[in-house]
């Protein structure tokens, strides 16, 4: 079910070494910045990394306007 899959993915992601997360995050940022749609965009939706997620916040140095989701209860 969805809950068990989510739990398994979180567990796998938590086991990725920090050095690998940094390396992969850098690759992801490079790939995103090479995309034509990114180059043409003025506004970009982004997230703050949580629980060992890829850190793409380096994108914020590109001079674009970034939009973060707002979480409400």
Image (cartoon, rainbow, N blue to C red):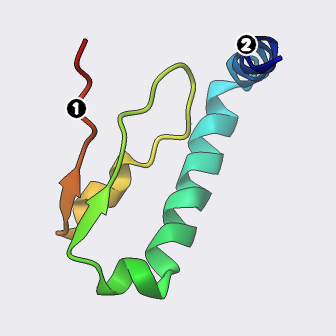
Provide residue 12's location: percent of width, then percent of height: 79, 21
Q: Secondary structure at mark 2?
A: helix
Numbered-mark total:
2
Please state if 30 lies on the left or on the right of 47 as rendered: right
Residue drawn at x 37%, y 40% is 47
Q: Which of the pair 72/50 is nearer the observer?
A: 72
Please state if 69 lies on the left or on the right of 6 as rendered: left
Residue drawn at x 57%, y 70% is 31
Provide residue 10's location: percent of width, then percent of height: 69, 18
Count neighbours of disc 1 (C-alpha within 10 A) and say few if under 14, some if 14 to 19, many if 20 or more. Answer: few
* Real-space Cα separation, disc 2 to disc 1, in angstroms: 23 Å
Question: Which image quarter: residue 52?
Answer: top right
Question: Which image quarter: residue 1?
Answer: top right
Provide residue 24's location: percent of width, then percent of height: 65, 48
Provide residue 43's location: percent of width, then percent of height: 22, 67
Q: Which residue is mark 2?
A: 3
Count neighbours of disc 2 (C-alpha within 10 A) and say few if under 14, some if 14 to 19, many if 20 or more. Answer: few
Please state if 25 lies on the left or on the right of 69 as rendered: right
Q: Is residue 27 above or below residue 7?
A: below
Q: Secondary structure at mark 1?
A: loop
Residue drawn at x 25%, y 43% is 68
Q: Which residue is mark 1?
A: 70
Residue drawn at x 76%, y 20% is 2
Q: Earlier in the sequence, mark 2 or mark 1?
A: 2
Label ID, residue 36: none
Q: Is residue 27 above or below residue 70?
A: below
Question: Contact, CB < 8 Å: mark 2 with mark 1?
Answer: no
Q: Is residue 20 above or below residue 32?
A: above
Please state if 29 lies on the left or on the right of 28 as rendered: left
Q: Which of the image's four quarters has the C terminus?
A: top left
């Amino acid at each position: 079910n969805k809950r068990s899959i989510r739990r398994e993915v979180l567990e796998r992601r938590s086991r990725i070494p920090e050095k690998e997360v940094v390396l992969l995050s850098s690759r992801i940022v490079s790939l995103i910045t090479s995309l034509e749609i990114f180059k043409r965009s003025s506004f970009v939706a982004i997230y703050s990394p949580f629980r060992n997620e890829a850190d793409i916040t380096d994108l914020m140095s590109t001079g674009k306007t970034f939009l973060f989701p707002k979480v409400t209860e």
